[in-house]
Image (cartoon, helix red, strand yellow):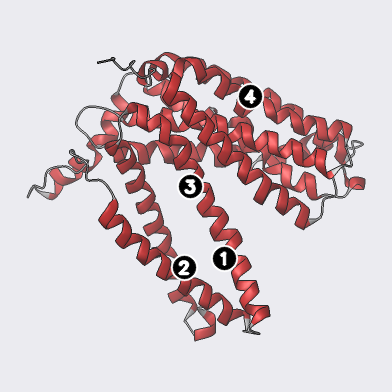
Amino acid sequence: AAVAFGAWLPAISCFFLAAAVASATHDAAADGFYIIALDASAQAGFSGIRSAVYKAGTVVGQGLLTMLGGWLCTRFRLPVEGSWGCVYAAAGAGMVLLAFYHLAMMPKPARSDAGEKTSAAPKESLLTFFAPYWHVVRAPGFGKALAFLLLFRLAESQLRVAVPFLLAKRSDGGMELAVVEQGFLYGTCGALALIAGGILSGYAVSRQGMRRWIWPMALAINVPDLVYVYLACVRPASLWVIGGCVFIEQFGYGFGFTLLTLGMVLMARGEGGRETTRFALFTAISLFGVMAPGSIAGYLLKIPALIFPGLDQLTCYRIFFLWVIVCTIPSFLVTALMANPLCDGFPPPAPRSES
């Protein structure tokens, strides 16, 4: 859309960079507000809603707005650049309206995460900036927390190979789904399953506490990975069966992801405020724990064929998905390490006294 108006490419790149920084800043601020404005029970209850709304925003941005652009292009015979310009203009106007709505309707927490404004020297200001990170590193149990953030999604993060597996031809070991079918299964059915799982787990923890649900959530994010072992070994042709497997895996991911979210919320608590800073740090560490194994998943898929040149691609897929199941073991181990702090941090709500 910007190219259509003759925008200079470096200027477009700078705009995209600024938008990315603004998005990351807003994400950190929203997470901090979520921690500051809610108590432990409400944090658990709304954790699923928070994840669901985030996923819904992704669906709107990548799905509905794309459909709107295509509809404008075909219905009104607009050029592609013009239709996308209209889409982004409408999206921008909607964001401005939402900003005013939030300004008027969002609650005003009694406490703030901002530090006191001082006229300290640059050296002292720099020390103040890094102080929250230093306190996190020195805190008791930081090693356990770090292991939890990096390893909890070790298996799930390697399932990026699942999409190429579903799209590849059966002669190449895949399930040979059409792009439209794969998009529907992941973009619609999978998104709905993930949202439902997140809402359900958050509600369950808020009602009954973490102690009752910590292991069901750990099982939910790991055990459904077996569906890809089933698909690679049985190779069903029915789209309903394949879709059911995707639904189960995504529902389990949504249900179990709440455990990671609440774990980061718990770690962000501490004396001296700065919950937003801590949560942003833990989010970055958790994302690295997903990106690092996910980036090498494709290479891991090829290793069996490099060791045994006679192996076909289907066998490589089967070995890889079995490897993913093995990678669930560290997830269970780090869950056990964090079980007591998590259960103590999110106890069941106190019974209401009858007056």
Residue designated by label 3: 53
Residue 118 image position (x, y, % from top left): 8, 47
Marks 2 and 3, Cα distance to the nearest angstrom?
Answer: 17 Å
- Residue 328 image label: 4
Residue at figure coordinates x 33%, y 27% from the top left? 40
Marks 3 and 4, Cα distance to the nearest angstrom?
Answer: 27 Å
Instruction: Choose the circle earlier in sequence order: 2 or 3.
Output: 3
User: Residue 14 lies in what quarter of the image?
Assistant: bottom left
Residue designated by label 2: 91
Marks 1 and 2, Cα distance to the nearest angstrom?
Answer: 8 Å
Instruction: Identify which amino acid the numbered label 1 is placed on.
Output: Leu
Instruction: Choose the circle earlier in sequence order: 3 or 4.
Output: 3
Instruction: Choose the circle earlier in sequence order: 1 or 2.
Output: 1
Instruction: Choose the circle earlier in sequence order: 3 or 1.
Output: 3
Nearer to us in this view, 118 or 97: 97
Q: Residue furthest left?
A: 119
Nearer to us in this view, 305 or 331: 331
Asked if one can make out residue 329 in the rendered structure from this viewpoint, the answer is yes
Residue 1 image position (x, y, % from top left): 53, 77
Instruction: Choose the circle earlier in sequence order: 4 or 2.
Output: 2
Q: Is residue 72 left or right of residue 259?
A: right
Q: Are marks 4 and 1 in contact (CB under 8 Å)?
A: no
**Judging from the image, what secondary structure is the residue with disc 4 in?**
helix
Instruction: Identify which amino acid the numbered label 3 is placed on.
Output: Val
Instruction: Identify which amino acid the numbered label 2 is placed on.
Output: Ala
Marks 4 and 2, Cα distance to the nearest angstrom?
Answer: 40 Å
Residue 341 image position (x, y, % from top left): 39, 17
Q: Are marks 1 and 2 in contact (CB under 8 Å)?
A: yes
Marks 3 and 1, Cα distance to the nearest angstrom?
Answer: 16 Å
Residue designated by label 1: 65
Residue at figure coordinates x 55%, y 29% from the top left? 256
Residue at figure coordinates x 31%, y 17% from the top left? 352
